[in-house]
Amino acid sequence: MAIRVSQPLRAFRLARALRAGGADDAKPRWTLPEADYHKYTYQPSIPDKHFNIGHWNYAPITMWLRARRPAMEKVLGDVWSTLKSTGSAVSGPVVSVVETNLPGFGYKVLGALGALLGYNIFVMNVTSRTEAWMFLEKLRLYAVGDELVHKGFFMSDAEDADKRQEGFDHTTERLNSLWEEAIADATQARSFDRLCQHLEVDPSQLPDLPTPISWRFSMMPYGRDDPDAKTFGFAAVDTPGSSNTPLLDLGSTGDYIDRQDNKSNPIRKGRHMYTAAYLPPTK
């Protein structure tokens, strides 16, 4: 009897006490705790009380969109269904004709090549018939631009001031020369009438008087800080950031409005080699 009892007792042994402990989230529970709600749910998840009513961090448009989501989904679904049905109705006969007249993959490839060839022939015919007219139009635009250049329309303020000063100097020198010649001739002849003869004016030789104001392209109000280029102001919060200028390389984008390049002078001359898309300096 003692032998029979001792044999089962050998199966029971005392194990070591494990002191690793257990995390709080490893314990099963029937309800979800109020704190750390997302920690106990599958992500991403939004509590019902935050989904169906307003929240301090929600924009008012969020609740408006959620309330109208079923109607918008119905509209978008119907639009997609209509477009798909219309596309099928239009493409169905075309596909049927293609399948009937171009059976097999090889004939379809030849048909696609024929369509491209026909398109190129069409473009070539249109270009050949309009090339002369387009060339004349370009010549006319060039003539207008060249005329404006000769009139000084594209001169800067400094160039206009230099031109006016140069004209003033030439006119002063011409009048002084005429006066010296006239007074010398009158002095030699000892006649006041001879001096008056030099003062006679020939209407055909009169120079044009300089215009007080020359209308030039640089006089156009332009620039972000020009008060004449502003009509109605807007809030400062609506002003785009200086780094939002598109079509320039990353980093400092400079100021395209005021013609301030973001590159130094050696690279600035080869701007088209350092940008993904080159913006020409035009107004």
Image: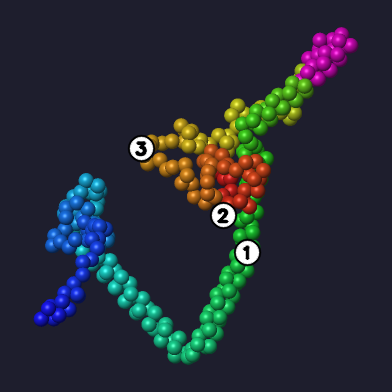
Q: Which residues are magenta?
A: 175-196
Rendered location of residue 226, percent (x, y)? 48, 33
| Residue at (78% x, 14% y) in the render | 196
Q: Residues within 10 Å of mark 2 (few under 14, many from 20)?
A: few
> Which residue is identified by label 3?
235
Tell me, what colour scheme is on the image? rainbow
Q: The residue under label 1 is which amino acid type?
A: Glu
Residue at image mark 1: 131
Q: Is residue 253 left or right of residue 16?
A: right
The residue depicted at 57 percent of the width and 71 percent of the height is 123
Q: Is residue 192 magenta?
A: yes
Q: Earlier in the sequence, mark 2 or mark 3?
A: 3
Q: Secondary structure at mark 2?
A: loop
Q: Nearer the viewer, residue 268 or 15?
A: 15
Please rate how many residues cluster around mark 3, counting C-alpha atoms within 10 Å: few if below 14, some from 14 to 19, many from 20: few
Image disc number at residue 276: 2
Q: Quadrant of the C terminus?
A: top right
Q: From where the camera sits, is residue 188 visible?
A: yes
Relative image position of residue 267 (x, y in whole percent):
64, 45
Q: CA distance from mark 1 to mark 3?
A: 49 Å
Q: Residue furthest top?
A: 190
Q: Quadrant of residue 231?
A: top left
The reply to whether residue 68 is in sight is no
Q: Quadrant of the N terminus?
A: bottom left
The image position of residue 278, as x and y in percent, is 58, 51
User: Of residues 69 and 95, which is closer to you in this image?
Assistant: 69
Give me the residue at 33% from left, 72% from top.
83
Q: Residue at x 49, y 47 (%)?
A: 245
Q: Residue furthest front?
A: 2
Give the total number of marks visible in the rendering.
3
| Distance Cα–Cα, label 1 vs label 2 | 31 Å
Mark 1, Cα crowd under 10 Å, few <14 / some 14-19 / many 20+, is few
